[in-house]
Amino acid sequence: MASITFGGLASGLDTNTIIDELMGLERQPIERLEKDRSYLNTRLSAFSSFEDKLKGLLSSVQDLDTAKELRSYTATAASEEFFTLSADSTASAGSYDIEVIDLAQVQKDVSVGYASASESSFGAGTISINSEDITVDDGDSLATIVEKINAANTGASATGVSAALIDDGTAEGYRIVLTGEDASTTFSASATGGVKSDGTKLTFSNTQNAQQAEVKIDGITIVSDNNTITGAIPGVTLNLLKENDKNDTTHVGVDIDSEGIKEKFDAFVSAYNEIITFIAAQENTGWETDSGMHSAKRRMQNLLVTSVGGTGNYQYLVDIGFETDENDGTIKLDSTKFNDAMNNDMESLEKLFLGETGVEGIATKFTDYLESITDSIDGIYASKKTSTDSQVRSID
């Protein structure tokens, strides 16, 4: 039978309401703890976002902390029909006329064709590659012969020739292809004895001769064992694609990559401003005055106006176009001033960011500080997470 409750029927008191209010009073400490826990977790989430932005700034600084990254060059050809090219930080500005005379190629010899690669139908005999004898046994197949040729291309007495099977799609399309190690490797290949299959003797014919790549750069002949040429033009790599018509040349210009360098500095500015804007957005959150965020902000602002010393003509970031907004603390980069510094005194710009002997540059100063405050053990977020986790466990 279901129970029946008559709240206040005998006494005239609204006991249900009284009980609800008493329960509400009893629950208030729990609600305060739940509110505290929610606050702590929300604050920790904010510090996690803060760390992500700090790491974003660190990444942008690390894109500027070596000469190779800071002093980048671009090499441009009048046409990419004959070669492609790339330049690194060791390049220097200049112009060149290049003629591709020959492409590098390796020697290739191809055997006669057979109907099967796996049929064990060869008789005993010998294959000689560069005077290195390779024994073929009764019952060998085309595939096992390939394995033996490749085995001979190992160790101190390697033949310098590798073998592969191809199928040209015809009835007797299985062939052995012999390939020289590089463009300077030539070889001879022959078979003797009872090496045959269905009366067809194993023979090889040359289909491609070994040939070094040859180019002329401003009339100077350069040769290479492959189609990638480095060192002929300082800091520039050529990847050869096609031979020029005789005496035709392709013009190449090597210049500092102003656009690419500027993009890296713009990324630094953007990452820095994201941090300043994020800190400002924490107003009225309860942790807006947290010392971790504000000490980081003050330290980075100080780094922006730090003099590096040294022998360069630029001592401060403001010297190369960095400007700080007095109202919100964000920064911007004066393109005219920066381009002037980059194009007219790149050496001083490098010293400002990279430093020199006995002098720390701006990039090093930022990197050291950002790595310390994003450290997985002692960083701002790591420390906050440790204390928050402890508080949440106590609440739970």
Image: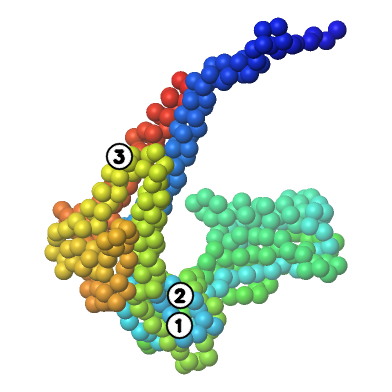
The span from disc 3 to disc 2 (Cα, nearest Å) is 51 Å
Between residue 4 and residue 109, name the one nearer to us: 4
Task: Please tell me whether mark 3 or mark 2 is closer to you in this view.
Answer: 3
Find disc 3 in the rendering and name its residue: 291
Q: Which residue type carries mark 1?
A: Ala
Q: Quadrant of the N terminus?
A: top right
Indicate the position of residue 136 as horizontal and vertical percent values: 71, 53
Residue at the far bottom in the pictured view = 247
> Is residue 211 something that shows in the picture?
no
Find disc 2 in the rendering and name its residue: 85
State the mark number for residue 114. none
The span from disc 1 to disc 2 (Cα, nearest Å) is 8 Å
Q: Residues within 10 Å of mark 1 (few under 14, many from 20)?
A: some
Please identify the quarter of the rendering in which residue 265 is found: bottom left
Between residue 392 and residue 379, name the one nearer to us: 392
State the mark number for residue 77. 1
Relative side of 249 to 202, left or right: left
Q: Residue at x 44, y 37 (%)?
A: 43
Indicate the position of residue 39 as horizontal and vertical percent values: 46, 34
Tag 2 secondary structure:
strand
Residue 255 in the image: above or below residue 190: below
> Is residue 108 something that shows in the picture?
yes
Mark found first going from the N terminus, 1 or 2 = 1
Indicate the position of residue 185 as horizontal and vertical percent values: 52, 67
Indicate the position of residue 378 as horizontal and vertical percent values: 34, 35
Q: Which residue type carries mark 3?
A: Ser
Q: Residue at x 49, y 30 (%)?
A: 35
